[in-house]
Structures are given as structure tokens and as C-alpha cells.
Amino acid sequence: MNKPERSARFPLGLQHLQAAQPARRAELRPTLRPQAPVDHAAREATRDPSRRASASGLGLDSATVRARMVDRLRADGVGCEPVLQAFARVERHRFVDSALATQAYEDTSLPIGLGQTISKPSVVARMLALLYESTLARGAGNLGRVLEIGTGCGYQTALLSLLSTSVLSIERLRPLHDKARSNLHGWRQGDMRLLHGDGRLGHAPWAPYQHIVAAAGGESVPAAWLDQLAEGGRLVAPMFDEAAGGQVLLVLDRTADGWRERRIGAVHFVPLKSGRE
């Protein structure tokens, strides 16, 4: 449930943020080939139930399976069509272990190893829709340059590649970074690069970013993220809120006059940590 906008003093504590450490040398995935044509069958399947029988593929590969997930997201209040179309195109079962594939299109988080999870589709959709409602995204019709903190298995990265002009995704855990590279091998959508590094530092060489999204929650927003967010841009991240007694979604807009903040609902993400392993 949405809450009224507040000043950026809490929970950000902007006056107490420390200067970011120097960015580390990037290990970047080579730029992928230009975006392929839109999967019109998948898009139409999300809009017209009568056409779902003709969606190509069988079983979990079928656009019909993804379309049902999109129907649930829409029923839950996600109304951003570009985000829904992205969900209709990316096969979530390819990003989870084969033993869990049959649960891939349920609205549930699933383990991906090392104590990490792939977030619920409803939570991912909500965060991406919040990004897409920013001033810059509404004006450009896309998310522009995006910084993703926490690549995980690469599922959200794939979604972002359909919604942006370029994505830089940082993962601190080497095994997950390698898993995401494997999962995204052959994915030919847009300009997408993966970095094994400390997400709290962002990646200054590619800044500024029009949008930043994080899949781990901390006590305050790292100074590097604030420095690297473009004017007019938006950051969406889980953040601890003392009043709520847990994590909430923080929506932070950078304006010409400063910062505008909202805190929305309650979420549960893994802790935001420094360093890389």
C-alpha cells in the first residue's frame, strides 16, 4: 500500500553517507548483438485469451504458460504494459534449477544457491513497473541506461534488457555471476553487461544511470548509487525502515532541487553486503 511522500532524510540519512570507495576494474561481459524482433505471439497471448491456443511451444516453453503468469500479475494490479510484455517473453524456468522448474511460473521465490533466491514474479514486476513510471522513462519510452545491483541468476537482467537501452548488472558472488553468464548465454536482446564486483560501489565509468534497481536491502542507500544516478532518474531498492520494523521498497527520485522519496509496502530481500567473493 502506497504511503505519502516524505523528505529524503529517513531512511536515507543522506547527511551521514560516506564517500564511495574507488570503483574496481570491471570484468564486463561483451556487448551482445542488437535486440531481436518482438515476439508478437507472446505479446498477443497476454492480451487476447482466444489466441493463446496458437502460442508456439509446448509445456514450460509455451507462451501460454507465461501468459497465465502475466494474467495473475495484471490481476494483482501491475498495469505497466512494457513490463508485462517482458514477462511474457522471458522464460523463467530457464533461470532456476531443473528440479524446481515446475514451480517457475508460480508467484513464489525460489533458491538459486549460496543462500540467495530468485524473487517472486509479483515483486520483480512491481519494482520494474515503479522504474517505468519515472519522469525519464515516461518521456523516453524506455529505462535508458540501467544499473542492476545483484544479478543473481540473471532473470531480472533479461527482463531489463527488454526495457532499457543498456544494462550493467553487478554480482558480488562469483558462482552466481558465473551462473548468470551461463543462463544468459545466447540471449540476444539489447546491450547487456555483467560485472563481478562490489555492488555497493556501483560502477562509475558507466555513470550516470537513468535508473538503478537493487535486489538486496541495507540500512541506507550507498553514496555511490546517489552519485551515479542521473538527474530525473529513479532508484528502486529494498531498504530497512525502523517504523515498519522491516524492509520496504524505497523509491527515490533525483530532481533538480534534490531528492524525493517514497516508501511502499513490505518486502523481504537478502542483506546488502560489501566486497566480493
Image (cartoon, rainbow, N blue to C red):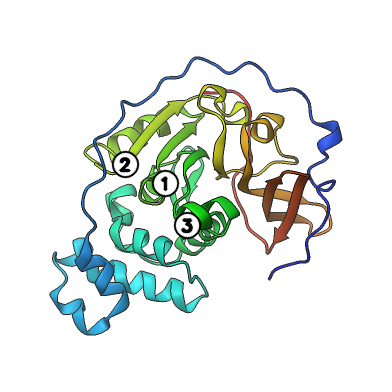
Q: Are marks 1 and 2 in contact (CB under 8 Å)?
A: yes
Badge 3 density bin: few <14, some 14–19, many ≥20, Cα 10 Å: some
Say which residue appears at 47% left-offset and 44% top-offset: 144
Would you say residue 260 is visible in this rendering? yes
Q: Is residue 140 left or right of residue 260?
A: left
**Residue 210 percent across, percent down from the top left:** 55, 42
Alpha carbon separation for disc pair 1 and 2: 8 Å
Alpha carbon separation for disc pair 3 and 2: 26 Å
Badge 1 density bin: few <14, some 14–19, many ≥20, Cα 10 Å: many
Badge 2 density bin: few <14, some 14–19, many ≥20, Cα 10 Å: many
| Viewer-proximal residue among 44 and 142 | 142
| Viewer-proximal residue among 144 and 26 | 144
Say which residue appears at 41% left-offset and 67% top-offset: 81
Q: Mark 3 is on which residue type?
A: Ser
Residue for badge 1: 164
Q: Mark 2 is on which residue type?
A: Gly
In this view, 24 is above or below 118? above
**Residue 225 percent across, percent down from the top left:** 64, 34
Q: Is residue 74 left or right of residue 104?
A: right
**Residue 235 percent across, percent down from the top left:** 62, 46
Q: Mark 1 is on which residue type?
A: Ser
Residue 207, quarter of the rendered image: top right
Q: Which quadrant is the N terminus positioned in?
A: bottom right
Q: Secondary structure at mark 1?
A: loop
